[in-house]
Image (cartoon, rainbow, N blue to C red):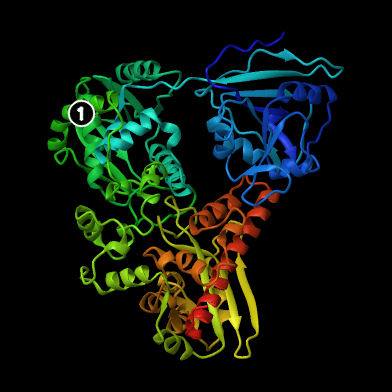
Amino acid sequence: MSEKSGKSSTPLRGAIVAMAGDRVIGVRGELPWHYPEDLKHFKKLTTGCVIIMGRITWESIGCKALPKRDNIVISRSKVPEVEHYDSIEKAINAYPKRKIWVIGGGQIYRAAMQYLNAIYITHVPKIIKDESPVKFPKIDSHQWKGGKIKYKIEGKNKLHYVVFRRIPKYKSKLSKSQIIVGLQCKKRLWLEVHKPKAAVVSSDIQHRFEVGHMVHDVAQSLHENGHLIEWKNDATHAIAETRRILADSPDTPVFEATFSHKDVLVRTDILQKESDGYALIEVKSSTSVKESNYSDCAVQTWVLENNGVPLSSVQLAHINNQFIYRGDGDYHGLFRYEDIQDDIAEFKTKVPQWVARFKKILAGNQPNIEMGTHCHKPYPCQFINYCSPSCANTVKYPVTDLPNDRNGKVAQQLIAEDVKDIRDIPLAHLEKEVHEWVRAVTVAGEADLKSTAAIEINRHPYPRYYLDFETIQFAIPIWKGTRPYQTLPFQWSCHIEEESGKLSHEEFLDTIGRPPMRPLIESLLDTLGKRGAIFVYSSYEKTCLKQLAAIFPDLESSIQKIIGRLVDLLPITKQNYYHPKMHGSWSIKAVLPTIAPNLDYADLGEVQDGMAAGVAYQEIIHANTTQERALSLAVDLRNYCKRDTEALIALVAFLSSGKIQ
């Protein structure tokens, strides 16, 4: 049978892959089979198109571009002699009208899934026996259709391929999430509906999403024999299935129960039968009830009550940060349930007004909303980059750069006075000393280093240690005896400087997946010895050490001695040094480019910040991560943590010199 493609306004965004049983697509960076007819099939489909691949795939084909195709490599570092981008999204956006094929490997397929509209799979008759094979992502039947019709590939091996097409997303006129977004910013609501491609999902936002999904899964697992309402082609099935379950099995806990009222769609996390009605349970990964949660639950309550669902309670299930994990998957007690039904009564009366207002906004033109604190609270916005350029292009040093400006009050007052650039602030107009210092330095256009910095640094004896931790916070604890969101160090880097100027480096990173805290602190105590200043940046390392002392009371005395030797460079830097290019921030990543531009975090691998470090560590210890992938991430983690302590060395040298180069 041959395949005929239907017409579509969106160009092809496909994945093409050869796959053995159990979704295996490769072993240790290599393709464990060779079928000439499949290669011919691959060539036929991809010729004249854009092909996107990962660096490992690029290297596996000899770093030579496949002819008659536009070859693109996804890599965070430079790839010579080929077009490359640091993300799938950027690569796809570079060719908005071209047919695009993603050709591997496993990580690239996973990253590309959300952008694809087709998947072509050649099934190969191979049985691969390997402990860590590379696998193609699971194909969610709720998002993809097809895969049943077999299309022949001419050749002696009698291969065939199947095609999956993405199911078009159902778009309700207004969802609960959109209402919550609208309450934060009307412009963001409009953009989410009319310009969704302008959104940039940062690693921080993506991590929040993933944590939320994990928390929801655990919360549902604590309600035994619950029924999950699956989302298929659109809301119609989910709404009908919800009604059926409530009618036929009213005592069954329902997950993602789906209701609609006046074009507003909601899906409740958990709907649990009680003696006098139902408990609507909203699950959150936070450790307390937030004000924004009231609006969230009010919208759900309004829709459910108008669907005739009697609610005996409206509960907010949030993380109990005093919960101590007992091991063996026992998460009873992880959540605190607070009944907020009375608290949301006033909010519920406002829902019809919200609905009418936001429908009107969505039917009109893009709202003109200036950037402000609402861009970050209560939730970080995905359209920061979209809204920023107009300001960034006209104001080099915006007044929003002023540090220690609680809720942006000073900046907002200046903007109201039509002062947008720090250099335009009148002399003696600012009350805070730090604001005036930042203004004066910015006006001068040159950095300022006070002589007291050298005096402070040079009083500390040798040997000198430069210490940095990398930590992880699990919303759902995985190690026995730990709590949700407990700060747990898994890595350290330490440079040691002798009075002679000799430098050495020690480090610790446990990638086995066991609790690393004990071997980490024991190895650190051995490395730090009994004397000498220990330079850190911020109080974070001190906090980590205090927590380790609490976890291991037998080591408390030794750890307290280490704490007594800590020298925090942040307050020293903040009191003595400022450069206009720091834009009001004394974070190490803001300071470093102004004193040691050669120590650039951008030239590192996948791990370039603390968030990425935590994500990388979680991937390393995950059971499904291949050994090759884990080793690669471990190298990136070591390089990143080492760069942090190299930065401390450069900072101490700079501050102690008393000179600006």
Residue in the foreground of this view, choosing between 507 and 60: 60
Q: Position of residue 203 (x, y in %)?
A: 48, 48
Q: Position of residue 22 (x, y in %)?
A: 68, 31
Residue in the foreground of this view, choosing between 550 and 508: 508
Can you see residue 278?
A: no
Image position of 151 with respect to 460: above or below: above
Residue type (three-letter) at the residue carrying disc 1? Arg
Q: Along the horizontal axis of the image, is 360 left or right of 319?
A: left
Q: Position of residue 656 (x, y in %)?
A: 49, 85
Q: Along the horizontal axis of the image, is 584 left or right of 635?
A: left
Q: Along the horizontal axis of the image, is 636 left or right of 206?
A: right
Q: Which residue is mark 1?
A: 357
Image position of 342 with respect to 574: above or below: above
Residue in the foreground of this view, choosing between 282 and 8: 8
Q: State the residue at coordinates (46%, 84%).
A: 565
Q: State the residue at coordinates (46%, 44%).
A: 206
Q: What crowding class fits label 1: few (fewer than 14 Cα within 10 Å), some (14-19), or many (20 or more)?
A: some
Seen as rendered, the residue at the extreme right is 156
Q: State the residue at coordinates (70%, 45%).
A: 55
Number of marks present in the image shown: 1
Q: Along the horizontal axis of the image, is 395 left or right of 204?
A: left
Mark 1: secondary structure? helix
* Viewport quadrant of the N terminus: top right
Can you see residue 142?
A: yes
Residue in the foreground of this view, choosing between 313 and 73: 73
Question: Which quadrant holds residue 408?
Answer: bottom left
